[in-house]
Image (spheres, rainbow, N blue to C red):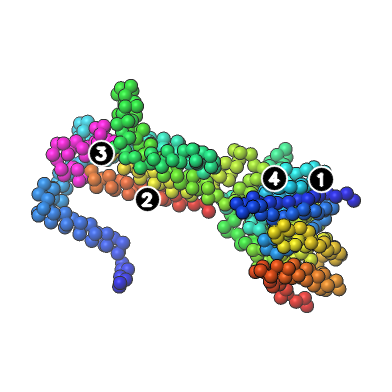
Amino acid sequence: MSNYVELYNLSKVYPTPKGDAVIVKNFNLNIQKGEFVTLIGHSGCGKSTVLSMLAGLNDISDGGIILAGRELSGAGPDRGVVFQSPSLLPWMTAYENVMLGVEQVFFTASKLERQEIVEYYLTVVGLGEAMHKKPAELSQGMRQRVGIARAFALKPKMLLLDEPFGMLDSLTRYELQQVLIELWRKNKITALMVTHDVDEALFLSDRIVCMTDGPAAEVGKIMEVNFPRPRERKAVMEHPDYYKLREQLIEFLEVRAHRKPASPILSATPEPATTFVPV
Amino acid sequence: MQTMKPFKFDWLVLPLIGVAVVLLLWQVSCATWAKDLPTPLKTWESSKPYLMEPFAKRGEMDQGILRFTWYSLILVAKGYFLALIIGTPIGFLLGLSKAFTKTFDPIIQVLRPVSPLAWLPLGLVLFMGAGKNASELGALFTIAICSMWPTVLNTAVGVRAIPQDYLNVAKVLKLSRTKTLFKVLIPASLPYMFTGFRLSLGIAWLVIVAAEMLTGRPGVGGFLWQEYNALIYEHIILCIITIGVVGFILDRLMSLVEKRFKTI
């Protein structure tokens, strides 16, 4: 199978008065069509920078990105982005927020068709009842559901998730991971997610890309995650390979952290999810 | 400090006490050091015809106080809308473009503190050719140029304060420029814009009095100046109180509108 997404020699350099600050250097990664890939690494290692270059929100300093055979330049609705903060426009209802994107992408569709798309995706993420509420009336988790619905409703070539559940409590996070994985499975959209939650990465991904610490972050190691799909959390956590993979991930993160003793992030313990013990 | 317990009708009783204290000071002043100041009672009696028949028109410069106020309000409204129509786009440009800011910000900072009394003669000169309308156009010019600055500056701040998240949404969805403006930029900066609109209205009302005094147009300010020249000092106080009350009401109304447009 050919590569659907290709990141080649991708670099991000910020010129500063003290010389260039190299955030990401020679980042190479290929993603297959329909694959779910996760970038994992410490905070500030540059994983979000890679994602925002893919989203077109950040300029590429060197190298490039090819999506579906075409070199990317700039942002566009062919990539559905789920931001860490839901980034909904507060003066619009959930429905209007999703419609804003749907109007952009399906401008040839009839009004009724667009309406159906918006309602369908909001219902699938569980907001059938609350779709005409404004973000201020929704919980943080519900807002992020709108964010997910907005990204999927665009029928994008690719899904970009920037720590999409980082601001949620762990119970809500589990719920939304489930919502995400089901939508992803039904729509078969190639996805790249950024996270620092080891369990989240293991549950959702086909492959996990560990990034070395910045500055000049690059691909450290790539792990295949072969749990059968459709996945269920309990089955995944009871899988014989689960703790082995988890161990490897944490070890990678800790070794990289130890490489720079000055770094304040010494304990690379993952998110609160670790306290969850499968019964 | 001991805090006072709120009692029933304190919202009414306490302000009335405040009024009473000021009236007393006024009365005492009349009796002691300000012999020319009309007493509260004299002021009331002399103002009665203007208050009791607020819309009467006995002559060009002898009309009910609300009629005068009405003339002033119409002029203010015209100048104020002119200020908003000019000021808001300038504010947007300042907020959106660094180059525009660098080019025009120094000029704005220099023009901003100039008093309406200084602008008015220039306004009259500018519209000298307009004949009969010269004083109205000059007044409008002065109101607009003096009152637009809060709108300009607050709009600029509001545009600059738009969270990057919203702009990213517009970028990712590839919204057109017009759509970005109307769906993202304007709603996001609306609360700041309305703060500017409210402050601008306050200034516009302040300017009207000066403008009318200098041009002698019928209105509260014109009436005030005429009665000063006619040595009827009671009416000066009547005008001051009217101007204050109207300004207060305008500010309240605008802050209601402002609250209504709190989008975030």
Q: Position of residue B168 (x, y in %)?
A: 63, 49
Q: Amino acid at mark 2?
A: Arg
Residue labelled with disc 2: B252
Instruction: Looking at the image, tell me whether mark 3 or mark 2 is earlier in sequence order.
Output: 3
Dots 3, 1 in contact, CB < 8 A: no
Q: Position of residue B98 (x, y in %)?
A: 53, 42
CA gap between label 4 and label 1 equals 15 Å
Q: Position of residue B85 (x, y in %)?
A: 45, 36
Q: Relative to residue B33, is residue A76 depicted above or below?
A: above
Name of the residue lying farthest toward the right: A1
Going by the image, does A233 lie left or right of A169? right
Give SS at disc 4.
loop
Residue range highlighted in magenta: B211-238
CA gap between label 2 and label 4 equals 44 Å
Instruction: Looking at the image, tell me whether mark 4 or mark 1 is earlier in sequence order.
Output: 1
CA gap between label 1 and label 2 equals 58 Å
Residue A98 visible? The answer is no
Label of residue B221 in the image: 3
Nearer the camera: disc 4 or disc 3: 4
In this rendered view, identify the residue nearer to me: A45 or A107. Answer: A45
| Chain of the residue under label 4 | A
Residue at 70 percent of width and 64 percent of height: A42
Q: Amino acid at mark 1?
A: Ala
Residue labelled with disc 4: A75
Same chain for the residues under marks 2 and 4 in the image: no
Same chain for the residues under marks 3 and 2 in the image: yes
Residue labelled with disc 1: A68
| Chain of the residue under label 1 | A
